Amino acid sequence: MSPDDANIAGNVHGGTILKMIEEAGAIISTRHCNSQPGEPCVAALARVERTDFLSPMCIGEVATVSAEITYTSRRSVEVQVNVLSENILTGAKKVTNRATLWYVPLSLKNVDKVLEVPPVQYMRKEQEEEGKKRYEQQKLERLETKQRNGDMIFPVINPEPYTVGYSQSSLIHLVGPSDCTLLGFVHGGVTMKLMDEVAGIVAARHCKTNIVTASVDAINFHEKIKKGCVITISGRMTFTSNKSMEIEVFVDADPFVDEPQERYRAVSAFFTYVSLSKEGKPLPVPQLVTETEDEKKRFEEGKGRYLQTKAKRQVHLQPLAQQ
C-alpha cells in the first residue's frame, strides 16, 4: 500500500480495498465460467453483500486478497473474498475485510446475453442448500432496492451546518477505456472506489475530522455503464448515531456518445463511516439535523438499519463470549 492508496492520516481508502476485492472476484468467476467448452464470457459484478472493514490498513502494509467460489446458480456465481494485511517489518498479520460478491457471465459476442454457469462441486449437500437460500434472499433485496431508485439529490442554497444539504456532494466522471472491462463496460471496482470517495467527502464535510469507512451495505448494480458515459456519483447523509454516519450514494449514467438516451440509475448503496482523532481514536459524531419530511423518513429508515446491524452483531458475539 502506497501513499496514493491512503488518506491524509495514512489509512488506506475503503474504495481502494473494494476495488481489489472486486478484481479478485472478477478473476475467479471469469475463470470458472470459462472452465468448460462453450461461448467465451467475462463475469460482470451484479451485487456486493454487506462488507465490514474489520481493521484499518495503513501505508507500507502488504495486502493479500484471496477469493473462493461458494455457490453457483444457473446464471450467477457467488464469490467469497478475504483481505489480509501484513506488516512486513514485524510480520504481524490481520484480516481486514470479508466480502461476498455476485457475478453474472456475459457473452463476449453479445454483451446483453447472460450465459449459463458451470456447476461447482460442493463438499457437503448443506453447502448447496445454504447457498440457494442466500441466492433467493439477494434476489429479493435487489428487487426492493430497484423499486426505491427514483430518488434524486439536488443542490441546496446556503445550507446550515450539520444539515443534509450542508454535506451532500457529487462527482462527475467521464468513463474512459482504462475504467472498463474487455466488453467496454465499467469495472465494478472502479465504480465502488468513486462511490467511496464521494461518501468520504460527505462524512468529512459533516465531521471536519479524519474519517474512515466502517462498512458498506449491499451494493446493487442495476444497469451496466458503457465506455463514453458521463456518470454522476451523488452522496447524502441519511443517519447518524453517536459514533457513526450512514451515507446514501447513487450513480447515475448519461450515455450520450454512441446511443443518446435518458439518464438512468446504475448503482446504489449505503456506506457507514466513523470519525477518528489524530491518534486514531473514535470521536463522537455531530448529530444530523433533518429539516424535511423526506429527510426525517430517511433518518428513521437508517436508524432501523443501524439497530438491525447492531442486533446481528450481538448475536454473532454471544457464542464467542461463552467460549
Image: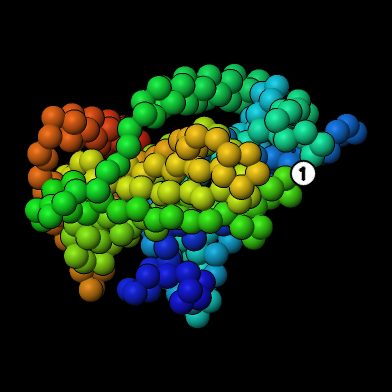
Of residues 24 and 149, the one drawn nearer to the viewer in this rendering: 149
Q: How is the image coloured?
A: rainbow
Q: Nearer the viewer, residue 84 or 320?
A: 84
Judged left or right of residue 295, residue 59 is: right
What residue type is disc 1 on? Arg
Name the residue nearer the viewer: 235 or 123: 235
**At x 16% / y 51%, what residue is drawn?**
157
Q: Which x, y percent locates residue 296?
A: 14, 33
The reply to whether residue 283 is in sight is: yes
Secondary element at image label 1:
helix
Residue that mark 1 sits on:
31
Residue 161 occupies quadrant = bottom left
Residue 309 image position (x, y, % from top left): 30, 35
Give percent across and percent down for residue 183: 72, 45
Please name the residue shown 42% across and 38% down the image: 268
Label 1 crowd (10 A; few <14 / some 14-19 / many >=20): some
For the image, the number of numbered tags is 1
Q: Quadrant of residue 114?
A: top right
Vertical relation: 145 (above or below) 278 = above
> How far across and down, in percent of the image, does residue 257 sit?
61, 47
Q: Is residue 50 visible?
A: no
239 sits left or right of 197 in the view = left
User: Going by the picture, which residue comes out furthest to the right?
Assistant: 37
Q: What residue sits 40% from the left and 22% below the top?
A: 147
Quadrant where the image shows the C terminus? top left
Q: Residue at x 9, y 53 (%)?
A: 160
